[in-house]
Image (spheres, helix red, strand yellow):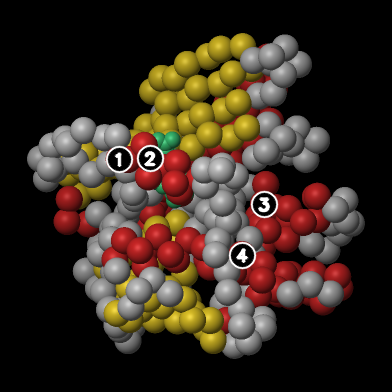
Amino acid sequence: MSLSEFQLIDTIRNFQPNFSDDIEGIGDDAAIIPVGQQSFVITTDSLVENIHFKMEWASPFQIGRKSAAVNLSDIAAMGAQPFGLFLSISVPKTVDYCWIEQFILGIKTFGVPILGGDTTSSKDSLFINITAIGKVDNNSIKRRSTAKSGDDIYVTGTLGDSGAGLYILQNNLDPVGFQSLVEAHLNPSPQLKIGTELAELREVHSMMDISDGLAGDIHHILDQSGLSATIDCDKLPISESLRTFCNKYDLDPIRFALEAGEDYQLLFSAEKKKCLPLPCVKVGELYTGPGQVKFLNSPSPDYKYTGYTHF
Ligand code: ADP
Ligand code: MG
């Protein structure tokens, strides 16, 4: 039997020795290491050529930018400010100096210093790993495990654009008119500003970033907070471009919004009916229950989604 991604992570977690109670390890978007009144939050993400990116689709600058963005998105998800990056690359012979230079410029777009890393050769594909470190006041940290029954569920921006951009690239469709969708896939932006603004709001109880699609990722908050949810598909923020694209190719925009990954918007829960001073969209509610999601106005009456897994 092959292991699922989450079984594998659980196996690693079960082999952990007990360590200091203050430190929070596996389970959230980043590990939390308190130092006085503040904490460092630390996360790592790998990008493998032909799995996470293709050289034909993206420039070296875009690949560098996205490698940093996906890591900084986890820093944003904790409500933290970026502090530094570590970059490890395994480089095949086909990659030259100019490529690396553009790649590094892409990483540097966010203005976060590279504090170290590692470099090796690789037989054929390019392998990138970035570790991002952030800093946050202890009482501003937003976790997945602290959502409350009765909270409203929000997202910070449109969903499904990146998935449609990937669909265009994979199926070699004409991108004219749908450049914003391709852009969303190749150049995602970590929600760092709104992440720190949400961190300051006490009524925001839990937060994570959406990397694998709302319908799957919501389960991390539900499982860790011991709650169930309703998601109203009519409330999902869907861009005009995604609607037009789906009309043209007879696709369902709601499925893109629920199931496609790599939007890197933030998903959070906040005290019911609070008027948030930020541009966020309410998509559902949390209630006491066994970790289930009810989809209102869903694509089909018995719609169920178990989530994206990397294997
Ligand atoms: P994200 O999508 O936010 O990057 P993941 O779903 O990749 O988070 O990981 C969930 C949690 O599992 C995180 O806390 C991460 O640090 C941990 N994790 C993932 N893979 C491993 C691994 N190979 N070893 C230890 N911890 C892991
Ligand atoms: Mg994450």
Say which amino acid is labelled 4. Glu
Mark 1 or 4: the one toward you: 1
Q: Residues within 10 Å of mark 4 (few under 14, many from 20)?
A: many
Q: Is residue 168 left or right of residue 43?
A: right
Q: Earlier in the sequence, mark 1 or mark 3?
A: 1
| Disc 1 C-beta below 8 A from ligand 1 | no
Q: Pick the quarter of the image with the C terminus.
A: top right
Of helix, strand and loop, which one carries label 1?
Answer: helix
Which residue has dot 3 on it?
185
Give the Cα separation between the discs numbered 1 and 3.
Answer: 35 Å
Looking at the image, residue 266 lies above or below residue 81:
below
Q: Is residue 180 visible?
A: no
Say which amino acid is labelled 2. Thr
Give the Cα separation between the discs numbered 4 and 2.
Answer: 26 Å
Give the Cα separation between the discs numbered 2 and 3.
Answer: 32 Å
Of helix, strand and loop, which one carries label 2?
Answer: helix
Say which amino acid is labelled 1. Asn
Residue 308: image location, x then y, percent:
58, 56
Which residue has dot 1 on it?
14
The reply to whether dot 4 and dot 3 touch (C-beta < 8 Å) is no
Of helix, strand and loop, which one carries label 4?
Answer: helix
The residue lying furthest to the front in this view is: 1
Q: Residue at x 38, y 54 (%)?
A: 77
Give the Cα separation between the discs numbered 1 and 2.
Answer: 5 Å
**Which disc number belongs to residue 259?**
4
